[in-house]
Every structure is written in structure tokens, then in C-alpha cells.
Image (tube, rainbow, N blue to C red):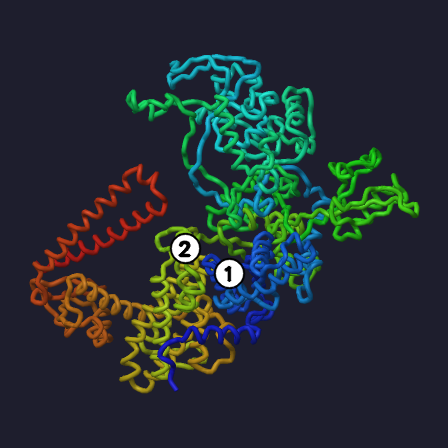
Amino acid sequence: MGMDKTFNAAEAEPRLSKAWEESGAFKAGANAKPGAEPFSIMIPPPNVTGSLHMGHAFNNTLQDILIRWHRMRGFDTLWQPGTDHAGIATQMVTERDMAENQEPSRTEMGRDAFEKRVWQQKIKSRGTIIGQLKRLGASCDWSREAFTMSGAPSAPEGEDGNFHDAVIKVFVDMYNKGLIYRGKRLVNWDPHFETAISDLEVENIEVAGHMWHFKYPLAGGATYTYVEKDEDGNITLEEERDYISIATTRPETMLGDGAVAVHPSDERYAPIVGKLCEIPVGPKEHRRLIPIITDEYPDPNFGSGAVKITGAHDFNDYEVAKRGGIPMYRLMDTKGAMRADGAPYAEAAQIAMAVAKGERSLSEAETDTINLVPDDLRGLDRFEARKLVVDQITSEGLAVMTANPEWENADAEGRVGLHPTIPMVEAKPIMQPFGDRSKVVIEPMLTDQWFVDTDKIVGPAIEAVKSGEVTIMPEQDRKVYFNWLENIEPWCISRQLWWGHQIPVWYGPSKEALANYDGRDFDKEFLRPEYFCAPTAEEAVAKAEAYYADAFPNVRISIASDLQDAVVPGAGGDGRFDLAIYRDPDVLDTWFSSGLWPIGTLGWPEDTPELKKYFPTSVLVTGFDIIFFWVARMMMMQYAVVDQKPFNDVYVHALVRDEKGKKMSKSLGNVLDPLELIDEYGADAVRFTLTAMAAMGRDLKLSTQRIAGYRNFGTKLWNAARFAEMNEAVGSSGTIPQPKATVNRWILGETAKIRGVVDSALSQYRFNDAANALYGFVWGKVCDWYVEFSKPLLMDGDAATKAETQETMAWVIDQCLILLHPIMPFVTEELWGTLGKREKMLIHADWPTYGEELIDPAADAEMNWAISLIESVRSARAQVHVPVGLKTPLVVTAMSDAARAAWTNNEVMIQRLARIEGLTEVDTFPKGCITIAAEGASFGLPLADVIDVAEEKARLEKTLGKLAKELGGLRGRLNNPKFVESAPDEVVNEARENLAIKEDEEAKLKAALERLNELG
């Protein structure tokens, strides 16, 4: 029974996947040669509740290529799979599912019950992303699937592992070494989820905004001469002012201002530096004063040059406040509403006033208790408060005024009811941060969090790349890596969530606080608590007992669920001193646990055989967008924990965009779903497309047309295999043939060349070069030229020639399957099993090592001469529009012996493939003849009587004229600096690409016109 006419990907892919997995083909060490060198890759763990997107498909295709290539070469390979618990994402998905099912809310069910509910969600969702990766053909060792929360106390049966233990151990060890600390710093705060989030979870989006200009009156009615000058030093404005003006996009944060800053070089404000000014909002009798200071941050040329400093709600202001010792007053609660806690505004403002005058100082913790939100604004949403603040300032006449254009443009009658000036409010686009999941505006918030002191651990991560111990490719991403690490900030590792690794720290009041405890406000004793960091509650209790023992010898420690449930200390009925400690409710940032992925998945802290064998890992394949968040942190963490690099190489791939170069987005409707593409075109076509476009450092522009084209490539391979089967050219033993026929000797050499190209490309992570070389070889050299040139030998050759051609073709087709398998695993495995009886599946076939010894220079020269002549004749005919089916004569004026031999040996095929009806030797070319050069010969194609030369010239000249106009327009746009600078990148790039295409088209048309000119 012959082969099917086409490859049925929908039927074959699941069948082959099952066969591979059930046979253990993916397992660590499978197909390894004795004493083999290890090769390992850790999959970047997708979110356990996630779904496969094009970025995943691209990333995992590249990893799979490397793994399959090394596995076939006999390396001891491990591709470690797994998923990330993805704290905020998984908690969000679970709560959404609970709401849809009308289950109790998270707070209603309590933490323990909620954690169990999330585990249920994890188990339900986990199969989705893993199943999708399998559909792509990912050959991970699925028996080793890891999870970043495995072994957690709340984990149900079947979720064993020690990843949780590893994470907790690292935290405790780093804390004990002074590498982790708790402090108050500014973080990205998500008011919807009520947690700190990472920069990666923030989307900066341009929105329509406003810039309000307000006056801050000088204290005590002071005045100064305000002078503005032009570039030449000429005075353009001079007036007496009793205020300093500022501009802000967030008026509600003015309530927390700690200072107004100006640049040290700004002469306009030199007379008032060091003086106090009044915040123009809040009850007049309690209006706060703040100092005017100097700092390098304000830009004298932007706005008024004066900047309000609200250290608790702006990242730039935070740095200024730290440098200047400016108090930072938090204005909002965890939901993004104006604070409603604490003492009345009058009392809080009085304390802040004393601080501003230098009469009082506050600790960080004391500053955080001061609520400077006026009583009438407390509890309001921040955006509601903004409106009221603007109204209050404006009604008091403290808005900076500007000319009213409506008044200026109106006549006397039209000016009735108008004012000549209006408050200065600029409508302008602003970049606003949004939570990528909550979609609410992120609030910079000064909060107590846990941090890694990255300054202490960053050194080895920088030096490893500088020294070449770790290689990052491409070079541009190496620069990004250095830039971030050399300017690194402390890493916030705590999150206010319930799903995740709960921070292993318990709090108790200090001994000093207990000694002064008067029986009231027990929670205040925790303003400066004692920390007990330990892997377990039992160990924390033991630490607490040891700490309190000297002051309270009979202390008895218990664990409270939170501060509110902590027992007020005192003597128990049995004479013991009872004291409760409670655990920090926060969980660790997901990036903290995934930062341990290389060692945690291999069983650390146990000294496992896998850890000894596969660590450090060979290469990390990752996207450029997580160089900071994951790559750099894995580097820091592995060096800090085990003092070793996590991987040898880092290959950073670019972004998959749509065919026009735009980022894929649901809102734009241009998202390509890899699973839908696999359904329509097959996994092999999707994989080959991504690989062929994977130029290092360059974004992919993906289109379904490209994928369809590479599906045709798979069909071409299938048809070549069918041709081989029909001619009994299958079932190769793997032994390299020793043919005599020129075409057979030639194709062996071409196969050897491509093997070298593919190995060289993959060893340098030039995936696209490997794919494109294979495409050219399989489609061009094998399916087109070799199949065509072999036909006379298979059909008309003698028995020996036919047998050697069958043997050679069988071997060459097998080599195509082997070399293509890492990129196109399904169709190649199917053909491998179809074309002969095999000792093992293709996935474990031996990768070839043959090389130049298979190249026959004489055969190579002869066949390439014949192919070049055919291609030249075809090109000349196409350029001048010779009808495709029409055969034309060919003439030649001179031929070398080698050229004559090549013609003679291949005359039948040349005439058939080039549509030539015969060759005539002449002394000179007749009129109306196109010259075709070939090595050792000069051919001519007489076409004067075949085509209408004048008509063809006119057609080409008309086309060139139209093209010239299009080129002029494109060049004009690209030569215009304003267009290049202001147009979106994708528009500029599209124009450049169109120009390149049009210029190539113009060159071809001009070449065709020159051909016609030869005809006279």
C-alpha cells in the first residue's frame, strides 16, 4: 500500500506525541551515548493558569530545536518543564472563578480555605498550558514537571516536591546574612488587588491628561523680584511675586508635599531658597508651610522650573526627599482612597508644621502615622479628591491665570459673561501607569515591604558576563543587562496576597517595649517589632523563647493568626508569662521563587544526582522583556545561594509582531493564536515559520501567508518522499552510498555541505540561518534538481545505475528527515516510520557527522554548471516574457572541453528543463539574440522572431515610469527628518521595507530592459 497523498497533521501529531512520550523518548538522558556530555535547558515556567501565546510558541520552539539537536547527537539531555504559581495572576483567576460560581469571597472563607481553593484551580488549569506545549511538539521530560509551590504546607496530596522548602531556606539564609531586610520604600501599588506589584506588571499608557498650575504663597507675605531672561541674558520679564508657581498632573498629592525644589543654577528663585511657602489647600487656619530647597532633579527649562516634592507618591520625588531629608507623608490607603485614619487634620498639620520649621523630628514609622488629608477629603476616592482640591485652590484665587482666548477673540458684546483670564490648565497627553491585570491606575505608595539588598549580591552577576563566564546574545541585550544591574535598586520581594510562599518571619514586641508596656494599645508595641525568621513556626517559637528568656524567664510563646488576635502579654494562671507572636501575612514575589528555578527544579538543597549532572545549565532561551525581572535575578540568586552561574549562555529572542510590525494586542484585534494556527496549518509549519524568521535581535513580522508557505514546504518534502517510494528508493540502511553517477555523487556533496551549515548555525544560535539553508537545500537541491535529474536514471538507466540511484535517493531523503527533524518533528517522524523499517524512532536517530569527504569536485562542478545554465535560460525567458510552454533554440559560439562534457552528459535534462529545442554552434550570434554566459561557454537565445520587442520595451518603460513616481514619494518621506522622528516606528520601518522592495523591482525591470536592448 502506497503513501497517503498528503500528510494529515491533525491525525498524526497527537499520535506521534503519544508514541514519543510513552516510549520515554523525552526523558532525561534518553539516547545519550556512554560518557556523554550533559546538555540542559530550564523552560521559562509559564503561569500555571496561562494559555499558550505566540511568545510561548516562539520561545519553546527554539528550545525544542536545541534539545532535539543535542539529543540526536548523543548528549545527555534534560529539558526541565514546569509552571509558575504566578501569585497575583492565579489569585485573580481563582477569585473570578469563585465569583462566577457564586462561592463565598476570599475574605469570607478565610486564608486556609482560600489556599485550598487556589490549589483546586491550579490542578484544573495546569493541564491547559502543558497540553498546549505538547501540541507544539515540546519534547520536555514531562515526568519531571516542576511547580514553584510544590511541597508547600497547603499543598494537597500529589503536589509533592521541595521547591517550597528551597524558597524558604533561601529567604532564611539570606536574612541571616543581612541580604534581606524590611524597610519603607516607594513601590508600585495596585489599589484593586491591594498589593505591591513589579515593574513588569505595570503598563504605561498614554492618556489624555491635564497639567494644573498653582501658586504656593510665600510665608508671612514675603515677596521677591522674579526675573526671566532670554538666551542672551536680556531681561524679558521682571515683577514682584509673593508666591512660587508649580505645575502638577496630580493635585490631590499636594496634600502630602514636603518641599518645593528648584535647580541650584536657577537664578529666578535664588532669593527665596531656604524660605518657607504655603501649600494652597486645606483649612486656612491650619495651612501647612514647606521649605523651598535646591536639587539637581528640577529642569529649569520645563514649566516654571519649580517642582513640588511628594516623596510618598512619586518615584522621582522619593529620591529628592531621600537626598534632602524631606518627610514623606502617605496620603492614601490600600484601596487608593484618601486616608481616613489617625488624628484630626488640625493635630496632624501642627506636627508637620513643627517638622518643617525644624522644631521636631519624626521617625519613619511616626511619619507614616501622620494623616495630612483635610477632614472634608478623608475617605474620598483619589480622583474625587482631585476635583475638590482643584476647586478649592481655584476658588481661593491661587491658580496661576492665563489669557482667555475666547475673551480675546470676542467683540464687546461677546465678552459679556467672560473673564479676560482663566486658570492655567494644559490639556496634554500623559503617560499613566496601569496594572496589567487590574487595569486600574497604579499608585506609587510608601509602604513597609521586604527587600533584597541587591547591592550586596549584584557583583558576581555583573562580573560573570564581563569575564565571559556567561555569554548573553545579542550584544544589545548584554548592554541592557549591564545598564540595569549597574544601576540596581533594592528588590521588593513582598506581596500583599494570600497565594504564594508566606514570608517566614514572625513578629513580637521588643523587650524594651514590653518593659514599658502600660496595658494599653498593644498594637503600638509592634511599631518597632522584633523579627523571628525561621523555616517553621516551631523554630520561630524557639527563637522567640530564647530572645525573651532573660527578661521573662517563664515566658510561654504562642502563635497568633495576626496582630489583632495577638494576646496581650501578662501572667498566665500557672505563673508563666504568656506572649503571642504572629506571622507576616505577606507572600514572596513570584520572581523570588522563579529566581531559584535552575537549582530548585533539580532538587536543591538536596545534593541530587540531577543537580550534579545538569547544573549549571547549558543555555537559557528567553524574551528580552524579562532580562531584568528573571535573567538578572537568576544570576544574582544562584551566585548568592550556591556561588555558581545558572547557565552558560543566554539567548535573548525578540518579539513576535503582526505582519505590519505592530505589537499583538487584543484591543487591536491582531492577535494570532498559535493553537488556531496549528489547527489550520499544522505544528511543523508554525514552528518552521518562527524559526526561519528568528534573526537574532530582530522582531518577527508574522503572517498567515508565511505559515501557509512553509506548510507548502512540508508538502513538497512529502511529495518527494512519495516519488522516492514509488521508485522504490526507500529503506536506507544508513550506510553512506558509494555511487558512480555524477548526479548521485553531486547530491552527496550537497548533503554534506548542508549538514555543516546547519551545525554551524545552531551552535551559534542562528536558528533562521539553519532553517533557511535547509529550506533551500530540501526544496531546491533535493526536491527540484535532484528529483528531476534522477528521473532518467531511475526510469531509463541500466540495473546498476538504477540501484545506486535508489540507494542514494533513499539515503538523501533520510538525511533530509534527520536534518529537518529538530525544526519539523512531526512530518519527519511520520515519513521516517513510513519509508522503512527502523531500529528506533527518528527522534533518537544518530545525527550525521560526515563532511567534506563526500564532496566530489568534478561532480560538483558539472552539476552546478548545468543547473546554472538552466536557471540563466529560464531567467532570460521570464524577463522578456517568452511564453512558458514555448520551446526556443539555443546557440553557442565557443565551448571549453569541460563545458562541452557537462553539456553532453546533461543535454537531455537541460533541454527539457530549460525548454530548449536544440543547440547549434555558430561563429557569431544572429541579430535579436540574448547573451547567456556560462563558465567556459557563451550561449545565445535567439528571440527576435519570438516576441514583439518594441511592445515589450514599451510595457517595461511604462512600468518603470510608474515605479519611479512611487520611489520618489517613498524617498521623499524617508529623507524628511520630521517624518522619521515623529512617525511611529512601525510606519517608518514599513516605508523603508517598501522602498527596498520597490528598488529591487526597479533593478529587475531595468535588467529586463537591458536584455531587450540586446535584441535591437
Q: Work out whether residue 735 can be spotted.
A: yes
- Nearer to us: label 1 or label 2: 1
Spatial CA span between label 1 and label 2 = 25 Å
In x, y percent, where is residue 508?
Answer: 78, 42
Q: Of the residues shown, which amino acid type is indicated by label 2?
A: Ala
Q: Nearer the viewer, residue 848 or 321?
A: 321
Q: Nearer the viewer, residue 521 or 323?
A: 521
Up the image or down, 516 lies above or below 944; here it is: above
Q: Earlier in the sequence, mark 1 or mark 2?
A: 1
Q: Which residue is mark 1?
A: 51
In x, y percent, where is residue 51?
Answer: 51, 60
Q: Which residue is mark 2?
A: 695
Check disc 1 and report its element: helix, strand or loop.
Answer: loop
Q: Work out whether residue 45 can be spotted.
A: no
Q: Residues within 10 Å of mark 2 (few under 14, many from 20)?
A: some
- Pointer 1 with pointer 2, Cβ within 8 A: no
How many numbered discs? 2
Q: Residues within 10 Å of mark 1 (few under 14, many from 20)?
A: some
In x, y percent, where is residue 703?
Answer: 36, 59
Quarter holding the C terminus is bottom left
Quarter holding the N terminus is bottom left
**Residue furthest right in the image:** 575
Up the image or down, 384 lies above or below 942; here it is: above
In x, y percent, where is residue 563?
Answer: 74, 44
Up the image or down, 906 lies above or below 874; here it is: below
- Label drawn at residue 419: none
Check disc 2 and report its element: helix, strand or loop.
Answer: loop
